[in-house]
């Protein structure tokens, strides 16, 4: 099966407008969390420094408007029966949920807790140690179409130390932080583990369908979609990540031993 993978360099708020209505089967979005500090906070016991990325700094109002705009555009490009998955931490997940529930017709199907068994320690020692991220799965129903949920595949192909193989998969997933072996192509401060994307794409799409990621970063969604024989569209504002994305797509392409079409729009 031949699949196509488009990488579009530019601002998602602009580039999403060029994507036709109802043309996408799944949107996975790992947007800015607005958790960066102008000066990162470090710790003498580790190399870990808190985030300080320009693309992740907004005022409160700017952040709300930004989230409303991209979520509404994603709702428009999703086909009926398609799904939107969004990732967040306590910094943004409540706002994303509020927007989905009050500003769109999407239906929330699940909230997944992604538990990180090897999470970073808490630097200040004034809070519990954050060791989870949160994902909202919502679907665009209507026109007689319901969401895709590949139930048998989830039972047999999504398992970990919380979820036994062959049983119904719970909404708590145990997945370690992105391993070094997935970071060989270059640096990205918030690269997601491939396993997280594999589970989402497996559960909510069929081979040959199209996955859109409006904040594709280092290209995790595109690389995983490619190996799973789904088409993909990835949008990324920072041109510096393009090299990483391209590097990651090439070996993914080789593993398939079949024709894959990669298109870069820069
Ligand atoms: C949280 S990261 C995504 C990381 C990605 N999931 C991965 O595995 O590499 C968010 C990405 O969105 C990009 N970004 C921020 N604002 C954007 C915008 N308005 N349009 C497109 N990309 C944007 C950032 O440069 C960053 O790479």
Image (cartoon, grey):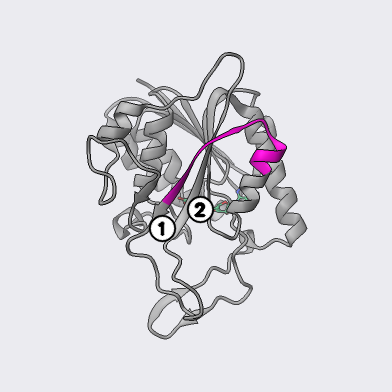
Callout 2: 10 Å neighbours few (<14), some, many (20+)? some
SS for tag 2?
helix
Callout 1: 10 Å neighbours few (<14), some, many (20+)? few
- Quadrant where the image shows the C terminus: top right
Reading the image, the residue beneath label 2 is 241
- Give the image quarter of residue 141: top right
* Mark 2 C-beta closer than 8 Å to ligand 1: yes
* Residue 218 in the image, given as x and y percentages of width and height: 46, 50
Do callouts 2 and 1 mark residues in contact (Cβ within 8 Å)? yes
- Give the image quarter of residue 74: top right
Q: Is residue 22 above or below residue 177?
A: above
**Magenta stretch containing residue 106, yes or no?**
yes
Reading the image, the residue beneath label 1 is 186
Residue 255 in view here = no
Q: Residue shown at 22%/39% (left/top)?
A: 165
2 or 1: tag closer to the N-terminus: 1
**Magenta stretch containing residue 134, yes or no?**
no
Point out the residue furthest to the right here.
61
Q: Nearer the viewer, residue 266 or 3?
A: 3
Please give the range of residues in magenta: 99-113
* Residue 137 in the image, given as x and y percentages of width and height: 51, 38
- Give the image quarter of residue 251: top left
Q: What is the distance, in whole Å, between disc 2 and disc 1 at their CAs?
A: 8 Å
């Amino acid at each position: 099966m031949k699949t196509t993978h488009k990488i579009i360099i530019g601002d998602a708020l602009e580039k999403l407008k060029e994507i036709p209505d109802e043309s996408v089967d799944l949107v996975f979005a790992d947007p800015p969390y607005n958790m960066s500090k102008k000066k990162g906070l470090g710790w003498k016991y580790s190399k870990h420094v808190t985030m300080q990325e320009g693309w992740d700094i907004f005022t409160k109002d700017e952040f709300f408007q930004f989230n409303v705009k991209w979520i509404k555009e994603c709702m428009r490009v999703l086909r009926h029966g398609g799904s939107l998955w969004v990732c967040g931490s306590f910094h943004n997940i409540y706002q994303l949920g509020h927007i989905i529930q009050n500003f769109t017709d999407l239906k929330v199907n699940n909230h997944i807790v992604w538990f990180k068994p090897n999470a970073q320690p808490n630097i200040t020692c004034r809070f519990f140690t954050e060791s989870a991220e949160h994902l909202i799965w919502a679907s665009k129903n209507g026109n007689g179409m319901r969401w895709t949920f590949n139930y048998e595949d989830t039972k047999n192909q999504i398992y970990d130390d919380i979820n036994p193989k062959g049983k119904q998969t719970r909404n708590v997933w145990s997945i370690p932080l992105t391993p070094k072996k997935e970071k060989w192509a270059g640096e990205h401060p918030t690269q997601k583990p491939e396993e997280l994307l594999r589970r989402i794409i497996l559960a909510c799409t069929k081979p040959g369908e199209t996955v859109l990621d409006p904040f594709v970063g280092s290209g995790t969604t595109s690389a995983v979609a490619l190996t799973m024989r789904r088409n993909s569209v990835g949008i990324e504002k920072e041109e510096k990540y393009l090299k990483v994305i391209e590097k990651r797509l090439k070996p993914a392409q080789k593993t398939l031993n079949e024709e894959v079409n990669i298109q870069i729009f820069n």
